[in-house]
Image (cartoon, coloured by chain):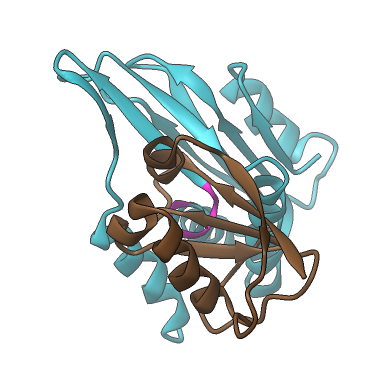
Amino acid sequence: MTVSVQETDFDCGAEIAALSAGDDEAGAVASFVGLVRGGEILAMTLEHYPGMTEKALQEIVDQASQRWELRRARVIHRVGRLAPGDKIVFVGVSSRHRGDAFAACEFIMDYLKTQAPFWKKEETPSGGRWVDARESDEDAARRWSGGS
Amino acid sequence: MSVNVFYFAGLREALGRSAESVDLPVGVTTAGGLRDWLAGQHEAIRMAKNLRVAINQKMVGLDAAVVDGDEVAFFPPVTGG
């Protein structure tokens, strides 16, 4: 299973171990974990588009697999209500060499940020507010289509 | 000709609904055309900025064709990760 959308938490150590378990061709594993930032946020609720979300994530992983030589890839994205410090997203990839793993991991996150149908609503002391999309996220995704 | 329209996130809240079945008016053949027609029905769509659209669960541009039976979703720019 490459892609999961779930309410439950995940175990980063187990996920990272699984990326290379039994595969002695894997020479590198890169991973990213996104967390709920605190500050004035009491909690956030993640909404998604069931059905499309899983397809969009798989499509992003497939694109990464076409660009880089990957052994395995894993994407987990949580939905529902999360508190500061909670994990939101895990992206992990394994490859023969580190360059492919680093690049593919960052590519998957950058595309996930702009292509996967998730929306965050923050709870603050003054009420709820939907998070606005950031132009810098669009820029981050666009740089991969330049010819890098 | 009818399509199933879904709304998400802030747009869903502003509309007070998450889905509706829409009989496509004559002349509405694209996602953008459908958005413009829906904007005439719902102020929340009229007021929404930068709406994104997916047809049959794939993100598309506003010039994408809409045909009978399609699942069409409108939503704000995504903010996951």
Q: Residue furthest right?
A: A22
Q: Quadrant of residue A138?
A: bottom left
For residue A26, side relative to residue B73 (left or right) = right
Q: Quadrant of residue A5?
A: top right
Colour of chain B in the rendered structure image = brown
Question: Between residues B9 and A59, which one lies in front from this camera angle?
Answer: B9
**Magenta-drawn segment:** A113-117
Q: Is residue A118 above or below residue A77?
A: below
Name the residue located 52 percent from the left edge and 37 percent from the top edge: B17
Residue B13: give x, y in percent of width and height.
41, 35
Residue B27: give x, y in percent of width and height.
61, 85
For residue A57, side relative to residue A82 (left or right) = right
Name the residue located 75 percent from the left edge and 43 percent from the top edge: A2
Name the residue located 41 percent from the left edge and 66 percent from the top edge: A141
Question: Between residues A124 and A15, which one lies in front from this camera angle?
Answer: A124
Colour of chain A in the rendered structure image = cyan
Q: Quadrant of the C terminus of chain A?
A: bottom left
Q: Is residue A147 above or below residue A17?
A: below
Q: Is residue A139 visible?
A: yes
For residue A27, side relative to residue B9 (left or right) = right
Instruction: Kindly report the secondary structure that dominates the magenta region of the rendered protein.
Output: helix
Residue A71: give x, y in percent of width and height.
75, 54
Question: Between residues B49 and A14, which one lies in front from this camera angle?
Answer: B49
Q: Quadrant of the N terminus of chain A?
A: top right
Q: Is residue B81 visible?
A: no
| A67 magenta-colored | no
Question: Between residues A89 and A123, which one lies in front from this camera angle?
Answer: A123
Q: Is residue B40 above or below residue A71?
A: below
| A114 magenta-colored | yes
Name the residue located 53 percent from the left edge and 64 percent from the top edge: B53
